[in-house]
Amino acid sequence: MNPAQQKTAKLARSGFLSLILQGDVAGLTTYTTKRRRTVAYPQAPPKEPVTPDQSVFRAMFASAIDCWQTMPRSQQQQWRTACKRGNLRVGPTALIVAAAFPQNLTSIRTLERQTATTLLNEDGTIAIQAR
């Protein structure tokens, strides 16, 4: 491990400000054990190339994040409001990612009804207003 990775690993293990690091962070792969200890080791490249299914899901996630970043602030506020009024434990970007999956359409429609917000168009696509 290089000095920067050693510092990151030490920070991850220290529980600094109750920060929980998981996944690939600064060239390290970290996770938390059942005994709440953080383990960090140098990030390893995947052994196998990306499968077609992985490519599809990665494209869906990228599309959802791109949608959020290009969405006008007023529309972003609708998604924030839906999360807040619905007492969701996820943020608006995670909700947009969920909306990208067709099996979540009914749940998103229910959330719209319960929170008096408009998130999707009639055809189930994400409603984006002109800037």
Image (cartoon, rainbow, N blue to C red):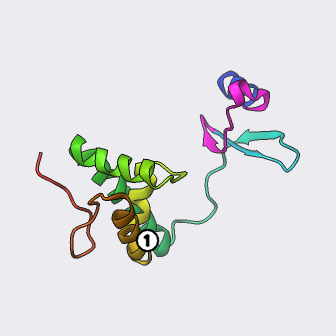
* Residue 110 among magenta residues: no
67 with respect to 86 (left or right): left
89 with respect to 52 (left or right): right
Residue 127, image x and y in percent?
Answer: 22, 61
Assign a secondary structure to mark 1. Answer: helix
**Looking at the image, which residue is at 22% across and 43% down?**
74
Residue 31, image x and y in percent?
Answer: 74, 46
Quarter of the image for residue 4 reads: top right
* Residue 13 among magenta residues: yes
Q: Amino acid at mark 1?
A: Ser
Name the residue tied to disc 1: 107
8 with respect to 32 (left or right): left
Residue 87 shows up from this direction: yes
**Count of labels shown?**
1
Q: In the image as oriented, which residue stretches furthest toward the left? A: 130
Quarter of the image for residue 112 reads: bottom left
Above-or-below relation of 32 to 111: above
Residue 100 shows up from this direction: no
**Looking at the image, which residue is at 69% across and 21% down?**
3
**Looking at the image, which residue is at 78% across and 31% down?**
13
Depth check, front residue: 57 or 88: 88
Above-or-below relation of 69 to 56: above
Depth check, front residue: 122 or 61: 122
Residue 23, image x and y in percent?
Answer: 64, 47
The image quadrant where one finds the N terminus is top right
Point out the stretch of residues depicted in magenta: 12-27
